[in-house]
Amino acid sequence: MFNSLALLASFCFVSSAFSHEEGSFPKKACDGNDTTVAIVLEEKRELTPDILLLSLRVNVTTAREIEAVNLIGILDEAIRKLNLEYKGGKYSVRENCWWDKGERKCAGYKGSIAYTFFLKSYSEQNEVLEVVDKFKREHGEKVKFEISEPEWIVSEKRKKEVEKELTVLIFEKAKGFSKVASKELGKICDIESINYERESLRYYSDQFSTFVSAEASVVRAPQPEKEEKSISVRASVRLRCK
């Protein structure tokens, strides 16, 4: 990878083997006795997911507005008692209206509340669904549930830890590259700048499917496979050689 440095000594331009972004590095590689060298480095790692992402939404239809609020409140209390990590819990209640042959009609109220759970194990998924099932059996057709496709993801904590490790590896590789550049060019090359680019991992799904109440008292939901996730850090490195 570093063999192209011999060309730099002869032609005083950054070799095409070293990628650089337009505007990030000057086209002119030499300024007086100085030489600028640019290269893009990348480190990648495969990670085993440690969090089961589960999105849940409940919709209720009632005759009175306060009844919709109370139903959502009952479910929210049961969810909080599980002591599981989640985001969300915001709710809305509105009049249940629709259009029929150009005429607006209304009957009762509709309410909804949504959660995104960050679960540590398959068994915690069943705990959530057992609460859902119990609530649906108690309140019948007033309640409808939707669940997104559960997926194993890499937690933000683990992701940041690995990004930090990859950043250090790139820095060490950049130092090694500066030594090679110094030797090949017969100059002293120092790292002038390192611009990091981190890959963004997003898993939130907007696709929901209806949850039907189970006949048995214990829910045994399917367990999604843990598919490895790739995480990478790229860096544009610029050396100044004198």
Image (tube, rainbow, N blue to C red):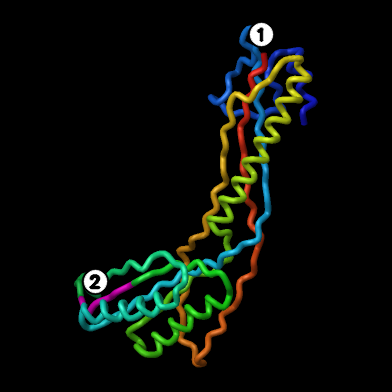
35 inside magenta stretch: no
Lateral position of residue 4 relative to residue 102, left or right: right
Disc 2 secondary structure class: strand
Q: Which span of residues is magenta-colored?
A: 106-112
Residue picked out by circle 2:
94
Q: Position of residue 208 (x, y in %)?
A: 46, 70
110 inside magenta stretch: yes
Three-letter code for the amino acid on which mark 1 is drawn: Asn
Q: Which quadrant: the C terminus?
A: top right
Residue picked out by circle 1:
33
Q: Which quadrant: the N terminus?
A: top right
Local crowd size for mark 1, using a 10 Å CA cut-off: few (<14), some (14–19), many (≥20) = few
Q: Quadrant of residue 91?
A: bottom left
Disc 1 secondary structure class: loop
The residue that appears at 46% across and 86% down in the rendered structure is: 213
Q: How far apart are marks 2 and 1 (CA)?
A: 72 Å
- Placement of 232 over or under 64, stated as above or below: above
Q: Position of residue 32 (x, y in %)?
A: 63, 7
Q: Mark 2 or mark 1: which is in front? A: 1
The residue that appears at 45% across and 63% down in the rendered structure is: 206
The residue that appears at 22% across and 83% down in the rendered structure is: 63
N-terminal label among 2 and 1:
1
Q: Is the magenta stretch mostly helix, strand or loop?
A: strand
Q: Where is residue 217 in the image (x, y as percent from the top left)?
A: 50, 91
